[in-house]
Image (cartoon, rainbow, N blue to C red):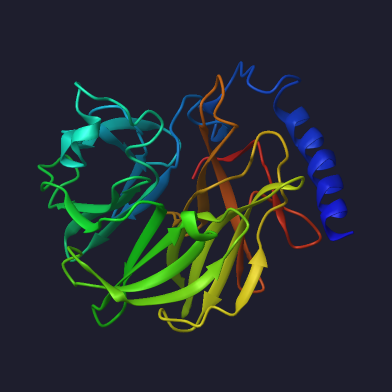
Amino acid sequence: MKHLLALIFCVYFSGCLMGQQQAEWGNWKNWGDQEDGTYLNPIIPSDYSDIDCIRVGDDYYAISSTFQFSPGMTLLHSKDLVNWELCGNIINDLTQIGPELNWDRMNRYGKGVWAGTLRYHNQRFYLFFGTPDEGYFMTSAAHPEGPWEPLTPLLAEAGWDDCTAMWDDNGKAYFVGTHFADGYKTYLFKMAEDGKSIDRKSAVLIHSGSGREASKLIKVNGWYYLIFSEHKPGVGRYVMAKRSRKLTGPYKEEKQLALPSCEAMEPNQGGIILGKDNNWYFLTHHGTGDWSGRIVSLLPVTWIDGWPIPGEALPQNIGTMKWGGKMP
C-alpha cells in the first residue's frame, strides 16, 4: 500500500508540475535567469550529471562527473546559483586513474569519473570521487582554477561509488562511501586530516540497500545530515536523509525528503547549500540520462521539523519538483 500511494503521488504531481513548465518535457522555450527577478528550471538545460555544490564566501562552485571523457570532473562557478560559467576541469589527465582510460585502450565507457564531493577546508578546496573499477581518489588545490595536485588513491577496490567527506569541529576528518557491489552498503571511515588516506579497518556500516547513492554530509543546527538518493523498482528514485547528533553516528533517524519520480527522476542527487541571502537551496540534476543527459535545476529548501524539504513543500511535509522561483 505504501508503494502504491507513492506511485500515485509520483504520477499525479509529476503531471501537474510538468504542466507548469511546458506540455512536453524537454521542450524548454525559456530557462534560467528571466532577468525580472525570477528564474525557470532547468537552469542548465544540458548534461551536467551528478552535480554537487558548495559556497565559499560570495562564490558558488559546483562539480559534474565526466565518466570516460577527458579532461575529467568539470568545475563550474556562479555568483547567484542560477547563472553558471565554466571554471575548468579538475582532472587534466585521466591516466592518473589507470591505464584503461588511456587512448590506446579506452574500455571504460560510462565508467571513469563518477559522482564526487567538493569541499572547502582550511583555505583549501578538496575533491573526492570514485570510479566503479579503480576505487576512490582525492585531490586538492589552494584555488579552484588550480593547479590541482595529482590524484591520490584512497581505496583501490572495485565496486564502490558516490562518496562524501567532512571535517568535524575539532578538525577530525571522515569519509563516507557506498559499496554498491555488496548490496549498496554505506560505510563511514576515519580519514587523515589532509584527506590523503582513509582507515579501511575503521569502517562502520551506516545503512544499506535500495540502490542508494549520491551521499552528501552537511551539518545544520547541531545535526549531521547524510543526504542521499534511493531507488526502488516500480516506485522510482527519491531523495532521503538520515541524521545524527554526532558525525560518527549512529544515524537512526531517517526521512524521505521528496516524492519519488517514475520517469524523469526529479528531483535527484545534488548539493544542499545555504545561500548568501540566508535561504537554503538544492542544486540537483534530473532526467533519465537519455537524449537530454541529466540537466540541472535549482530548488528552494524549506526546513520542516528539522528536515530539509526540497522543491514544493506539500501538506504532507514532503517535497516535489518546482519549475521556477525567485532569484537567490
- Quarter containing the N terminus: bottom right
Question: In the image, is 184 to the left or to the right of 311?
Answer: left
Question: Outermost residue, right direction?
Answer: 1
Q: In which quarter of the image is residue 216?
A: bottom left
Give the percent coordinates (x, y) of residue 104.
19, 21
Above or below — where is 313 with respect to 217? above
Q: How many labels does the image show?
A: 0
Above or below — where is 99 with respect to 149? above
Question: In the image, is 177 to the left or to the right of 209?
Answer: left
Q: Is residue 120 visible?
A: yes
- Of residues 96 and 175, the one nearer the viewer is 96
> Residue shown at 64%/16% (left/top)?
27
Question: In the image, is 13 to the left or to the right of 129?
Answer: right
Q: Is residue 34 visible?
A: no
Question: In the image, is 143 to the left or to the right of 275?
Answer: left
> Residue shown at 73%/39% (left/top)?
262
> Residue shown at 20%/22% (left/top)?
103
Give the percent coordinates (x, y) of residue 165.
34, 64
- Of residues 283 and 184, the one nearer the viewer is 184
- Of residues 298 and 24, the one nearer the viewer is 24
Give the percent coordinates (x, y) of residue 327.
52, 40
Give the percent coordinates (x, y) of residue 306.
61, 73
- Of residues 323 and 99, the one nearer the viewer is 99
